[in-house]
Amino acid sequence: MLKRPILVNKTAILAGHQDCVYALEIGRTPYEIFSADGSGSVAIWDLRTPDLGKLLAKLPNSVYALCYWRERNILIIGQNFEGLHFIDLTLHRQVGSIKLTSQAIFDIKIYQNLAWVACGDGVLIIVDLPNMAVKKHIKASEKSARCIDIHAERQQVAVGYSDNAIRIFGLNDFLPLANLPNSHLNSVFCVKYAPKGNFLLSSSRDARLKIWDIDNNFALHQEIVAHLYALNHIAFSPDGENFATCSMDKTIKIWDSYTFQLLKVIDRARHAGHGTSVNKLVWTSYENLLLSASDDRMVSVWQLTQGQATKNAEFAQT
């Protein structure tokens, strides 16, 4: 079978952070990118002119989570040990804040003006955004809620926890729908619904990638030892055909969304990749650019294209 290898070109480095970069988010346009780090700095970048990043906010605590609220053109910043800050991107200033928790805030996702916030004490906090008020607390674990993903069509929310479990909740009634105890050997760092097909993907400190069959009561479809160390994040391509994973082992890997075949490894030796843990990814439709954030304080910008077809299926390492 003919294969079209993925070609990788590092087009830019977004430099200027003074600490490990933990969060990335896409804004109103596919070339508007936000990043945040362990010092509390939040920056805004334009991928058309990537050398001209600007400091958007400076908070006193580290930031692990960013979420863009499209309806109001507001960036929501999760300040660890504090709460949410709202930056109006039209007015270029903070327009509100909510004191939520004394714990770390690991993830924020939005659906219909409600924000789901994953906290370090195992609590999911659901926030009414227009009123900037807490609507509900969901306490499903004594360990951290680490990651969230929402499937609007199926009306469900997947949450990964540090007790190794994945739990599924109703999007509108907030009731538990499914529980996957011991889904991984360690903390679940990322959950992502596949944009095509009936799968939920998850990653963990155990370095494994797992694929769960949504239509079969979340039965395990496939397990892959995908990296050498903690698998930190998953990002799907804009067309849903591929996805990327990143790891504490310093690599980024590109996979086929249908076969889960490894297609490409992006590393330091062959592609001038990161020299430390890769923490977060975003894959934007602007020139099909994949962005990776790292402990090296950099955000690397990768352009992925397809080369000429080849009969050789073993091209993942090239």
Image (spheres, rainbow, N blue to C red):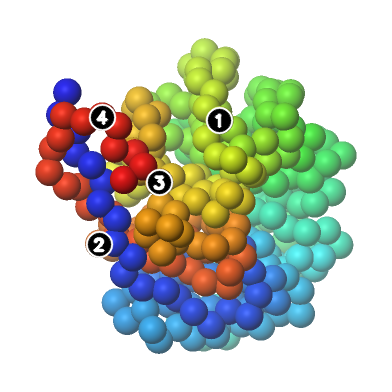
Q: Earlier in the sequence, mark 4 or mark 3?
A: 3
Label 4, residues with CA under 10 Å away: few <14, some 14-19, many ≥20: few
Q: CA distance from mark 3 to mark 2?
A: 20 Å
Identify residue type, mark 1: Val
Q: Position of residue 202 (x, y in %)?
A: 57, 35
Residue 21 in view (yes/no): no
Vertically, is 217 above or below 77? above
Q: Position of residue 30 (x, y in %)?
A: 34, 64
Left or right: 10 as drawn, with respect to 171: left
Q: Earlier in the sequence, mark 3 or mark 2?
A: 3
Label 3, residues with CA under 10 Å away: few <14, some 14-19, many ≥20: many
Q: CA distance from mark 1 to mark 2?
A: 30 Å
The mark found on residue 265 in the picture is 3
The mark found on residue 313 in the picture is 4
Vertically, is 269 above or below 167? below
| Label 3 residue SS | strand
The mark found on residue 225 in the picture is 1
The mark found on residue 287 in the picture is 2
* Image quadrant where residue 14 sits: bottom left
Q: Residue at x 51, y 39 (%)?
A: 192
Label 2, residues with CA under 10 Å away: few <14, some 14-19, many ≥20: some
Is the Cβ of the residue at disc 4 closer than 8 Å to that at disc 1?
A: no
Q: Earlier in the sequence, mark 4 or mark 1?
A: 1
